[in-house]
Image (cartoon, rainbow, N blue to C red):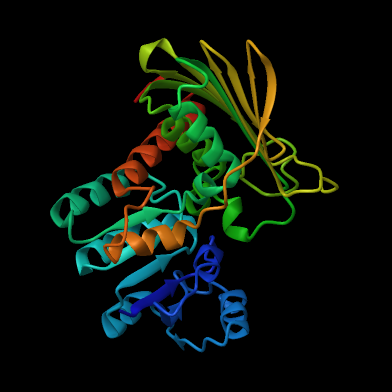
């Protein structure tokens, strides 16, 4: 079976799709998600892969005309949730950039629409960092009981800023650094611990953002989880340009038996017998996982319910930072 795919926009991680191209996937058409969005980088990479899609100026017209099985949604972030709603209403599976909504209103509509099509239409947020070898390994160790009962969690997201597109400079179109960058770590904490969030307090700052308008370059969240577990998260766009990698992702889980750390793409466990370095599992592929779900070949590791839940928590954290008060989740 050929899966017909349309791509809306080129402002997100459409690379997940290009990394998982196969004979089952047919990219038939592309369009911008907002007027004036430059999709030349997407078209160039598709042509490098010998793919010549039809090009539309209007994404809704494309979806109505092409009637794809799947739509990849990765335009300016404030529009992703609105286009996801359209996809759900049209019965189209969606592979959508995170956050799947930049406001509570869109997220509530997504949740309502999904309850009507659950079991028929599937969507996945692009939480592709779950599939990195070091996080898969950490997940497996926690599930094996290697660290005992989790009592404390810390996560870090640090990125190089560089020069970001203009839509990053406005909260209305970008959504905020906590919901764009921090959401990954919010996902790891929930996915690996299987604990739910109860409340959050957060702070953020735009100082030293190199002329990027309303974009926050530093932030921190303090979460209360179930069973009195405390989780902290820091985000920043101040990773030096001279660093070897674009990102510096870290995770530390303190348990009753051991401490587990993900740092520098390594997984380190310290217990009563000493410190142990674990060989990471193989790299996973989120779009391949998504395709297996809709083709009935397996279960996607990122579900619609988790996509909604993690987005809700991220929006609560942003609200806490904006208002400088504790927000119940």
Image point (13%, 54%), residue name: 116
Q: Position of residue 126 (x, y in %)?
A: 46, 53
Q: Nearer the viewer, residue 95 or 35?
A: 95
Which residue extends farthest right?
242
Residue 326 visible in the shown view: no
Q: Quadrant of the C terminus?
A: top left
Image point (51%, 10%), residue name: 256
State the image quarter where residue 200 is shown: top left
Q: Is residue 309 above or below residue 287?
A: above
Q: Position of residue 161 (x, y in %)?
A: 71, 48
Q: Is residue 295 above or below residue 302?
A: below
Q: Position of residue 277 (x, y in %)?
A: 69, 30
Across the whole image, how many numbered discs are drawn on residues? 0
Residue 251 visible in the shown view: yes
Image point (49%, 54%), residue name: 173
State the image quarter where residue 66 is shown: bottom left
Q: Is residue 186 above or below residue 47?
A: above
Q: Nearer the viewer, residue 94 or 76?
A: 94
State the image quarter where residue 119 is shown: bottom left
Q: Quadrant of the N terminus?
A: bottom left
Q: Is residue 254 above or below residue 105?
A: above
Q: Position of residue 149 (x, y in %)?
A: 45, 15
Which residue extends farthest left?
116
């Amino acid at each position: 079976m050929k899966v017909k795919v349309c791509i809306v926009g080129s402002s997100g991680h459409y690379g997940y799709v290009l990394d998982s191209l196969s004979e089952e996937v047919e990219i038939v058409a592309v369009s911008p998600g907002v007027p004036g969005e430059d999709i030349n980088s997407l078209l160039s990479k598709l042509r490098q892969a010998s793919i010549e899609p039809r090009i539309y100026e209007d994404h809704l017209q494309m979806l109505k005309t092409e009637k794809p099985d799947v739509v990849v949604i990765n335009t300016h972030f404030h529009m992703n949730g609105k286009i996801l709603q359209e996809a759900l209403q049209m019965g189209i599976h969606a592979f959508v950039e995170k956050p799947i909504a930049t406001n509570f209103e869109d997220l509530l509509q997504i949740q309502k629409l999904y309850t009507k099509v659950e079991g028929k239409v599937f969507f996945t947020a692009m939480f592709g960092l779950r599939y990195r070898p070091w996080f898969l390994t950490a997940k497996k160790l926690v599930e094996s009981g290697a660290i005992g009962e989790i009592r404390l969690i810390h996560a870090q997201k640090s990125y190089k800023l560089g020069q970001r597109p203009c839509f990053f400079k406005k909260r209305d179109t970008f959504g905020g650094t906590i919901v764009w960058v921090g959401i990954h770590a919010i996902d790891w904490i929930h996915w690996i611990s299987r604990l739910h969030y109860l409340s959050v307090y957060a702070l953020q700052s735009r100082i030293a953002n190199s002329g990027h308008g309303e974009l926050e370059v530093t932030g921190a969240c303090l979460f209360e989880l179930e069973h009195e577990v405390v989780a902290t998260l820091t985000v920043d766009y101040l990773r030096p340009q001279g660093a070897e990698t674009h990102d510096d992702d870290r995770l530390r889980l303190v348990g009753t038996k051991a401490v587990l750390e993900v740092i520098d793409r390594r997984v380190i466990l310290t217990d009563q017998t000493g410190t142990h370095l674990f060989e990471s599992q193989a790299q996973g592929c989120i779009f391949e996982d998504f395709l297996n779900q809709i083709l009935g070949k397996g279960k996607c590791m990122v579900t619609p319910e988790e996509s909604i839940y993690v987005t809700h928590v991220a929006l609560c954290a942003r609200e806490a930072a904006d208002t400088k008060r504790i927000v119940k989740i």
